[in-house]
Image: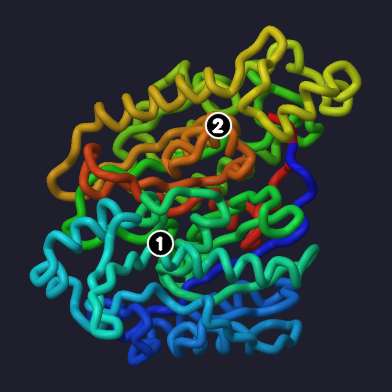
Amino acid sequence: MTKKLSTRVVIVRHGLSSYNSQQRIQGRCDESILTDTGINQATILGQTMSNANFAAIYSSPLQRAKQTAEIIQAKLVKPLTLQTSDLLTEIDLPLWEGLQKSEVKQKYPQEYQKWKDHPGQFSMTLTKDEKSVEYFPVIALGEQATKFWQEVLAKHQGETILVVAHNGINRALLTTALGMNPAHYQHIQQSNCAINVLNFTDGWGGAVQLESLNQTAHLGEVAPAPREGQQGLRLLLVRHGETNWNRETRFQGQIDVPLNDNGRQQSQRAANLLENVQIDFAITSPMLRPKETAEIILHKHPHMKLQLEPQLKEINHGLWEGKLEVEIAEDYATELEGWRSHPELVQMPEGENLQEVWDRAIAVWQKIVAQVEMRNDRLTTGLIVAHDAVNKVILCHLMGLSPADFWKIKQGNGAVSIIDYPRGTEGICVLQSINITSHLSGSIFDQTAAGAL
């Protein structure tokens, strides 16, 4: 539905470092080096991406990122020169660097809490030229990330590039590209040697799509494992498997189209991915394609009862349902172009508008979160299976985006997204992963059908 995306950017974080393992704040300190585990992670990452057709590799100059990039570079089939950029250095936290997180919490309790809860407002008071200066690290990092995008995207139209950097700057690259508020900086997870993919149209300022966030399956884990003793809620948000209408680019909406054979295979692969995940409850849209997807996944969890939730149904496309995109273009050219460019403004003829889908999907999501009974010994994990539009609006909401940002989110058939509420249902959510599809094709890129909804 969106324009052809011309520039693809793969963003990865460095491998596990000595400061990571010691729970120390790294920032721009360059004493931290890769551990043996970090070297192994980088090696696996390089092997995973070895056949990718990268046009360039950019790295932070800090040694933990540069060494990761060099390990990846050595594994690539296509030889490339590594380019370092100071615009990829980690967030600057000068008062905290080298301290263990426990020390920071003890010495700077109020500041640490603001860092976690209100990162855009978090500041440090520094001395510069014998004067006290209030410095806002997250805001400064966003400006740094924006400069990187402006410099690099113009050089690589129509190409795929690799960026190897750090937790903080990766978050800033993602949030600035997607137009997210700095308040959501802490809502994005960046694991060591995880993979993110962004697609851009027309360079900086054009359309952008988050193809995937924080893929870790190549490292042998579905998502970052909860820390020892961590409680709270984890939700596995899955899009149904493929249908023939997905493959044909025919609008489904609320017409009850079943899975095709490939869709059942995709659902089985999602089941295999989630086989060893403890699932405590399962909810699905009652339509055939998500319901069958959920049932296939739950074959690995035979004692789980599946709940049906009508408010998770797909968007009602009204008179567009059952039609191919080319057919809709003949009769509703203006409306279809509006749907592609400004989806929040389009009223489907005799159907829904995006705000109506947003209202019902977010309401049921919040109801699910509020009604979960927490366990005292581990995470409570729920499976939710729904549709492209429903999943997109939920993820937009959790990222602080709006209905106008609908096309910024990719949801492939059979894809899995993972959302945590580590402090319980009253705390902030953390987007652990979005649009995991590697279990479907073995590729780091989403290769599912780009069909209609």
In which quadrant of the rendered view does residue 76 lie? bottom right
Q: Quick one: label 1 or label 2, which is nearer the N terminus?
A: 1
How does the figure colour the protein chain or chains? Answer: rainbow
In the drawing, does residue 436 fall left or right of residue 430?
right
Against 39, residue 10 (above or below) is above
In the drawing, does residue 254 fall left or right of residue 68?
right
Q: Kindly identify the residue that appears in the image at 29 percent across and 85 percent down.
A: 129
- For disc 1, the marked residue is 139
Q: Kindly identify the residue that appears in the image at 39 percent across and 73 percent down.
A: 91
Q: Residue 443, image x and y in percent?
A: 65, 62
Say what secondary structure mark 2 lies in: helix
Mark nearer the viewer, 1 or 2: 1
Q: Residues within 10 Å of mark 1 (few under 14, many from 20)?
A: some
Q: Kindly identify the residue that appears in the image at 26 percent across and 29 percent down.
A: 370
Q: Point out which mark residue 403 bears.
A: 2
Q: Point out which mark residue 311 bears.
A: none
Q: Residues within 10 Å of mark 2 (few under 14, many from 20)?
A: some
Gap between marks 1 and 2, in whole Å? 25 Å
Against 348, residue 437 (above or below) is below
Give the residue type that dot 2 points to: Pro
Say what secondary structure mark 1 lies in: helix
Quick check: can you spot residue 282?
Answer: yes
